[in-house]
């Protein structure tokens, strides 16, 4: 009886811990999703201010040979470099756009990127 009781409470503890862990994981993922969802509209706002002129509403305008932003395969770091330092006909925005805004723009670009599918 004693042994059985111990075993039971042991299992109980483990499944309890597992349960907590699963809830934690679920919560952080949900929070992350919500954060991303909040940053995308801010990113769109900055994108409209600084990028839309050449790249257009949906990233495909291509003014002055601007790259189609729906088909780029650059990682975030490379994109932030292009935004900061420019490339070809695109001037850099270093000192003009705040770092946080750049992060938001990159989030928004990943949304645009999804549109091609
Ligand atoms: C004056 C017009 C203009 C503006 C404004 C502009 N771009 Fe560009 N962008 C270009 C051109 C032109 C290119 C192509 C550069 C090249 O490859 O020579 C380009 C290329 C890019 C690329 C691809 C770079 C690569 O290595 O393939 C990204 C990403 C990009 N722009 C993002 C942005 C973002 C984000 C903004 C706003 C913060 C922005 N651009 C504003 C004209 C512009």
Image (tube, rainbow, N blue to C red):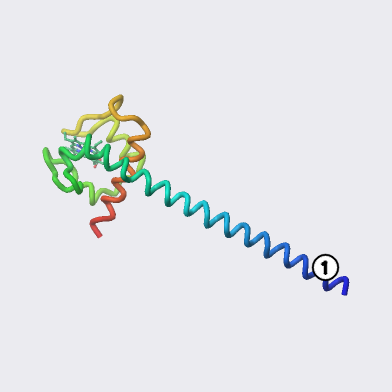
Q: Is residue 7 left or right of residue 66?
A: right
Say which of 57 and 63 sits in front: 57
The N terminus: image quadrant? bottom right
Residue 45 in percent (x, y) is at 27, 39
The C terminus: image quadrant? bottom left
The image shows residue 80, relative to residue 15, as above or below, that is: above
Instruction: Identify the residue position indicated by label 1 in the image.
Output: 6
Residue 82 in percent (x, y) is at 28, 35
Q: Is residue 23 left or right of residue 92?
A: right
Tell me the residue at 22%/34% (across/down): 87
Check the image and name the residue furthest to the right.
2
> Does label 1 point to a residue whose CB lies under 8 Å from ligand 1?
no
- Disc 1 is placed on an element classified as helix
Say which of 114 and 73 sits in front: 114
Tell me the residue at 58%/60% (across/down): 22
- Disc tally is 1
Residue 7 in percent (x, y) is at 79, 69
Q: Is residue 82 left or right of residue 6?
A: left
Residue 105 in percent (x, y) is at 31, 40
Q: Quadrant of ligand 1?
A: top left
The image shows residue 50, relative to residue 116, as above or below, that is: above
Check the image and name the residue furthest to the top.
95
The image shows residue 44, relative to residue 116, as above or below, that is: above
Q: Callout 1: few (<14), some (14-19), or many (20+) C-alpha neighbours within 10 Å? A: few
Tell me the residue at 57%/54% (across/down): 24
Tell me the residue at 22%/39% (across/down): 48
């Amino acid at each position: 009886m004693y042994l059985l009781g111990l075993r039971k409470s042991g299992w109980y503890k483990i499944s309890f811990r597992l349960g907590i862990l699963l809830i934690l994981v679920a919560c952080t993922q949900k929070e992350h999703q919500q954060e991303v969802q909040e940053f995308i509209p801010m990113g769109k706002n900055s994108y409209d201010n600084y990028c839309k002129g050449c790249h257009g509403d949906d990233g495909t305008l291509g003014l002055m040979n601007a790259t189609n932003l729906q088909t780029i395969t650059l990682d975030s770091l490379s994109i932030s470099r292009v935004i900061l330092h420019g490339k070809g006909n695109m001037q850099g925005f270093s000192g003009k756009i705040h770092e946080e805004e750049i992060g938001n723009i990159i989030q928004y670009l990943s949304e645009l990127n999804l549109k091609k599918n």
